[in-house]
Amino acid sequence: MRKSISISILILLVFQNTSSLWVIGAFYINQDYIAKNVCINRFDAVPICKGQCYLTKELKTTEKQDQKIPTVTYKEIQLFCEYEMIFSFSKPVLFSKRIYPVLKKDQLKSAFIFSIYHPPRCA
């Protein structure tokens, strides 16, 4: 379904954009009939235009129809924001001093409570 809709829209766009080519092609196919029956100068003794007047008239009408179609205007949307980079000549800090906690001997616990820390017993 989608494929057929997309193909039909594509065909319509091709016909719309090449409308002057279709008018010229139809003129050359039917040039004898147009020169004898539709041409403005068909009653002259020696027809000079051979239907070219009809072709120019049809091309002008198709050009007017093309001008009636509004042109598409695009709105520009900014996709990213560029920030200004501040540059300074100061030396970069590569290593900073770390402050380690101080441990005192009275804070260290060296005695284990053996009633809690013992291997499991077999039942």
Image (cartoon, rainbow, N blue to C red):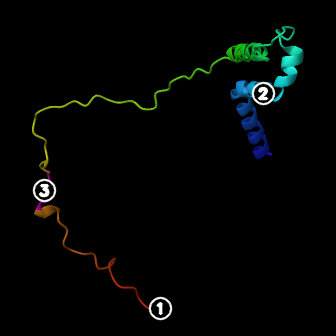
- Which region shows up in magenta? 99-104
Q: Is residue 72 left or right of residue 52?
A: left
User: Which residue is disc 1 drawn over?
Assistant: 123
Q: Earlier in the sequence, mark 1 or mark 2?
A: 2
Q: Earlier in the sequence, mark 3 or mark 2?
A: 2
Q: Tell which residue pokes out farthest to the right in this image.
A: 37
| Secondary structure state at the residue bearing disc 3 | loop
Q: Work out how far the residue at label 1 is from the one at label 2, CA to CA, in angstroms.
A: 110 Å
Vertical arrangement, residue 24 with respect to residue 105, above or below = above
Vertical arrangement, residue 5 with respect to residue 64, above or below = below
Residue 82 location in percent, x, y?
35, 30
What label does residue 25 carry, if any? none
Badge nearest the viewer, 1 or 3 = 3
CB atoms at circles 1 and 3 under 8 Å apart?
no
Q: Residue 30 occupies which quadrant of the picture?
A: top right
What label does residue 102 carry, if any? 3
User: Which residue is disc 2 drawn over?
Assistant: 28
Three-letter residue code for mark 2:
Tyr
Residue at image coords 13%, 56%: 102
| Secondary structure state at the residue bearing disc 1 | loop
